[in-house]
Image (cartoon, grey):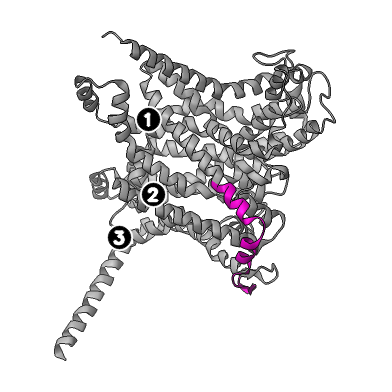
């Protein structure tokens, strides 16, 4: 079939807009990346636009020489790994039990959890709750904070509900109890959804900032995002006052910030292409029914 | 007399039977209930205990007396908030920032999803998707850090370009008039691409035969989009809109907090950032709780209202 002229123009317009969109998404990241490897003098002169000028690793050396970066990195990994484990365990337990229509009190429990999607007590009462439970400035507090997303529980429940009851019945005849059925029948079948939720939880753990900033006072406990934020504030304070523009020709406050940004964002962006297919699997569709 | 007695006996027997059934059910499903214990405990501690703490909005919090022991003061904090100088400012800013976000980013997400669907080459399409989903994996701190760096007056790339073009440097983040635009752009950068996922999967679910029939009838591309694709995803759009409106008041705090500074409070300060400053920086616990409660109630009304409305318009809602 031959394309008409208007078809052709439509195609060109679409590709053009998409190209601009891709550019707008990529360029800021690209700029930060090349600037972090470039000489500070070149960066502030505005020469670094498309590629690295005066290549050097000075900014990275300074970041890693800084106190606390390694510790912050460790903390972020700790919170991400154990936090995600906690989150997904609670989500599976709740989602599974609530997927059984025979369960007494299910309607009430569902209302009990969905209500929290509609109404939130707000920042202060939540903070005071953490204080009452002695969770302020503890690792446990960060692990528990935001551990369960009601929305994901509902997705999990919808997924379990879609698995036919006959699977459960035949396992029951073999003498399996509910816990064994969950582990050996339901978990393997729900694996795609569970993987997707694990990834969602993981990303929000890795990138989480607000409550870590509020709940943690001890520098030994803070994750990377909080360190990065502190760094940006102090550094931008430095160069916006015009006091120190470039410490040397090779590194400056801002190239150090760029390097820290790269270090903080890189792990998620590097694993992302490999996990992308899980995200695209139309997982939300299930939630809409819930 | 005797009739009522039999009735009463029946009901009590029924009750017994019910209780027996319930007991049997609990016994049968005891493992499920055990699974629910940590889950429900989590909700009680971290969702409902804060709600219990909301009483502080009507009290003067004293750390020594605790939440329960503090003195009741009625509506004092609400009166203070609404007669104070900041109520109108933070309400207006919250509203405006969300209007910007809805008009620009929410619409853009749908438009981009529709366009993506029109990219016929599969490889190019998935390449585009891979790129535009990316910013979702960048944290708000990193995104804000990028914005601050790129807009920096001393050496940010934007100002460098402005100078090269012979224009004056602009300290974007210190000018109240630019704040909403910057916030919306940053939010859009982070969310538009990833937001298309849900619409893409909704478009996939549309029956192909509809498009074929339309082609036979001689419908062009645009006509197909208007008459088939858009109606096909109308449900999804409604649901997303409800969720967006429902989260309107709570979502913006983190990004604003990372971008604003006292000089831009005029247009930047939203309800939640105000709650944050009053509560955690100035330790006005009760006052902050009251403003937060106001925020929560308005949110609640918005979600319920949006859902009701969508039932009327679309015959479908979130629940």
Residue at 31% over, 53% down? A100
| Residue A161 horizontal/vertical position (percent) | 30, 46
Magenta stretch holds residue A33: no
Q: Nearer the viewer, mark 2 or mark 1?
A: 1
**Frontmost residue, A74 versus B249:** B249
Q: Chain of mark 2?
A: A
Whether discs 3 and 2 lie on one chain: the answer is: no
Q: Nearer the viewer, mark 1 or mark 3?
A: 1
> Tag 2: Cα neighbours inside 10 Å, few (<14), some, or many (≥20)?
many
In the drawing, does residue B277 fall left or right of residue A283?
right
The kind of secondary structure element at disc 3 is helix
Cα separation between marks 3 and 2 = 18 Å
The kind of secondary structure element at disc 2 is helix
Cα separation between marks 2 and 1 = 26 Å
In the drawing, does residue B75 fall left or right of residue A178?
right
Disc ID at residue B28: 3
Give the answer, above or below, for where B73 lies relative to B42.
below
In the drawing, does residue A48 fall left or right of residue B252?
right
Disc ID at residue A95: 2
Q: Which residue is mark 1?
A: B200
Magenta segment range?
B68-95
Magenta stretch holds residue B69: yes
**Frontmost residue, A225 versus B154:** B154
| Residue B87 horizontal/vertical position (percent) | 62, 56
Majority SS type along the magenta span: helix
Whether discs 2 and 1 lie on one chain: the answer is: no
């Amino acid at each position: 079939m031959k394309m008409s002229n208007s078809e052709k123009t439509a195609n060109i317009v679409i590709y053009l807009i998409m190209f601009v969109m891709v550019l707008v998404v990529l360029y800021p990241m690209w700029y930060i990346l090349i600037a972090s490897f470039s000489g500070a003098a070149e960066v502030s002169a505005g020469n670094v636009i498309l590629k690295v000028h005066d290549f050097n690793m000075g900014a990275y050396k300074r970041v890693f020489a800084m106190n606390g970066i390694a510790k912050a990195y460790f903390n972020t990994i700790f919170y991400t790994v154990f936090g995600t484990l906690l989150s997904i365990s609670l989500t599976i337990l709740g989602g599974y039990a609530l997927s059984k229509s025979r369960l007494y009190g299910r309607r009430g429990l569902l209302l009990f959890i969905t209500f929290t999607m509609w109404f939130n007590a707000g920042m202060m009462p939540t903070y005071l709750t953490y204080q009452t439970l002695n969770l302020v400035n503890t690792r446990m507090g960060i692990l528990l904070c935001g551990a369960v997303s009601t929305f994901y529980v509902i997705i999990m429940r919808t997924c379990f509900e879609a698995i036919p009851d006959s699977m459960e019945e035949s396992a029951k005849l073999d003498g399996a109890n509910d816990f064994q059925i969950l582990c050996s029948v339901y978990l393997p079948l729900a694996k795609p959804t569970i993987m997707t939720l694990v990834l969602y939880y993981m990303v929000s753990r890795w990138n989480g900032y607000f409550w870590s900033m509020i709940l943690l006072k001890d520098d030994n406990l803070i994750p990377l995002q909080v360190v990065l934020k502190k760094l940006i504030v102090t550094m931008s304070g430095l160069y916006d006052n015009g006091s120190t523009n470039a410490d040397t020709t090779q590194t400056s406050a801002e190239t150090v910030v760029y390097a820290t940004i790269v270090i903080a964002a890189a792990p998620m962006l590097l694993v992302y292409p490999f996990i992308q297919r899980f995200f695209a699997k139309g997982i939300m569709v299930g939630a809409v029914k819930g | 007399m005797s009739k009522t007695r039999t009735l009463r006996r029946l009901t009590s027997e029924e009750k017994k039977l019910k209780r027996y059934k319930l007991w049997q059910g609990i016994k049968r499903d005891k493992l499920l209930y055990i699974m629910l214990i940590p889950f429900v405990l989590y909700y009680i501690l971290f969702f409902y205990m804060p709600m219990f703490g909301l009483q502080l909005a009507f009290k003067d919090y004293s750390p020594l007396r605790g939440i329960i022991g503090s003195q009741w003061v009625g509506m004092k904090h609400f009166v203070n908030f609404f007669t104070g100088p900041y109520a109108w400012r933070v309400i207006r800013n919250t509203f405006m920032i969300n209007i910007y976000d809805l008009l620009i980013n929410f619409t853009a997400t749908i438009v981009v999803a529709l366009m993506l669907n029109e990219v016929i080459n599969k490889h190019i399409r998935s390449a585009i998707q891979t790129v535009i989903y990316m910013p979702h994996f960048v944290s708000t701190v990193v995104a804000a850090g990028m914005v601050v760096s790129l807009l920096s007056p001393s050496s940010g790339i934007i100002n460098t370009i402005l100078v090269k073009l012979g224009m004056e440097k602009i300290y974007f983040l210190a000018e109240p008039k630019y704040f909403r635009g910057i916030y919306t752009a940053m939010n859009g950068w982070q969310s538009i691409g990833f937001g298309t996922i849900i619409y893409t999967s909704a478009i996939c679910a549309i029956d192909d035969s509809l498009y074929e029939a339309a082609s036979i009838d001689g419908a062009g591309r645009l006509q197909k989009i208007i008459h088939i694709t858009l109606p096909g995803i109308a449900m999804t759009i409604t649901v997303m809109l409800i969720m967006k409106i429902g989260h309107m008041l709570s979502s913006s705090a983190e990004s604003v907090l990372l971008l604003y500074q006292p000089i831009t409070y005029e247009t930047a300060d939203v309800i939640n950032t105000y709650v944050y400053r009053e509560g955690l920086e100035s330790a006005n616990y009760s006052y902050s709780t009251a403003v937060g409660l106001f925020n929560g109630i308005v949110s609640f009304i918005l979600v319920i209202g949006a859902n009701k409305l969508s039932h009327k318009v679309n015959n479908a809602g979130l629940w």
